[in-house]
Amino acid sequence: MKRVVCAAIALASAASTPAGAQGALNLYCSVQVEWCQAIATNFQRDTGIRVSMTQRGSGENLAAIRAEAQNPRADVWFGGTGDPHLAAAEENLTQDYESPNSAQLQPWALTQWRQSNRRAVGVYAGAIGFGFNTELLGRKNIASPRCWADLVDPRFKGEVQLANPNSSGTSYVIIATLVQLMGEDQAFTYLRQLHPNVNAYARAGTGPIKAVARGETAVSLSFVHDAVVERNAGFPVDYATPCEGTGFEIGSMSILRGARNLAQARRFYDWALTADVQRLGYDVGRQLQTPSNRATPLPPNAPDLTRIKLIDYDFARYGRSAERRRLIERWDRDVGSLP
Ligand code: PLP
């Protein structure tokens, strides 16, 4: 079995703490570390509130929040795929809040808010697709993948990387997408057929596209905005979205039930939904998700979701706690246990 290591990376914010009694905020963050650091540093600078930030994958943060439910260590959970935020809402691990800034948001961000009983709000969106190293594929004379059906072709033997759904929200979106496209049994047959082509199931959802950029694997299953991050950094990376259609995430934010610093948590939540702060994702973090504030422009060369063949992703169903747990357990049994 390809093992996943679920170690947390704890990072103290690098910003200097202004004197004063503005209090503190404990932030769990599930986007890329560059963006997590940018929001921690800027919130601290803007408000004088001392931020302690821990970055982990979506599944890992959900597991930590569950484990700490009787004595929550965090106040806010920023970012990460929407399904585990919905599961946390259903499990009563988060609390409802309506921000005065919610009127500025895209409809899909508010759909997430309503579906979670006002406990999770959308901060960004992104679509699943294939990232690939154009130099590596060219050297091996392998045509790049265009469709889900291509990926199980023997030409990709040992060339594909994706993440483990226990730790990664990205990987859970991929499984839920395949189930919605193919039906559940066929989706797991597909994932078993894909297994010989997979060289590793990474811990973090962004691990596979970083491996593509470094030339360690030819193809990744990733959010396609992350492929553009690597291309912008100068790596020979391109992406495609599956011809059969693909799934997407509503990256979310929630305030934890029992948050010790509730006033600071609400202040952060309101701040994070503003147009200027949503620009930090690209301007400082170099990330290319679709922002949820309608006044925040789509970053240059970011994938345009209106031009991608998206499925009508059933967030209510696949965000349900029991459904998420059941599908991940089935993946562990049917795929994760394969040699
Ligand atoms: N980083 C970025 C840039 C993302 O868009 C997402 C998805 O929300 C994640 C990280 C989530 O990572 P993981 O799949 O490890 O939960």
Image (cartoon, rainbow, N blue to C red):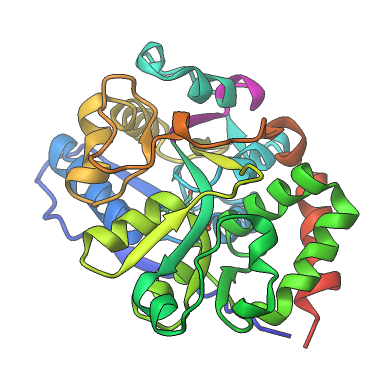
Residue plotted at (58% across, 68% down): 163
Q: Name the residue furthest right.
A: 185
Residue range of the region highlighted in magenta in the rendering: 113-124
In the image: residue 46, left or right of residue 49: left
Is residue 157 toward the left or the right of residue 45 in the image? Answer: right
Of residue 220 and residue 1, the one placed in the foreground of this image is: 220
Q: Is residue 242 visible?
A: yes
Residue 234 placement, left or right of 242: left
Q: Position of residue 48 (x, y in %)?
A: 16, 40
The quadrant of the image that shows the N terminus is bottom right
In-image side of 242 versus 43 (left or right): right
Q: Quadrant of residue 187?
A: bottom right
Figure check: 105 above or below 116: above
Residue 277, image quadrant: top left
In percent of width and height, residue 279 lies at 22, 36
Q: Quick one: quadrant of the C terminus?
A: bottom right
Percent across and percent down for residue 248 are 56, 41
- Examine the rendered structure and indicate whether residue 50 appears above or below residue 277: below
* Residue pictured at 18% horizontal, 60% vertical: 14
Q: Residue furthest bottom?
A: 339
Is residue 231 or residue 89 the one in the foreground?
231
In the displayed structure, 109 sits above or below 134; it is above
Magenta residue check for 153: no
Q: Let me know if residue 120 is in the magenta part.
A: yes
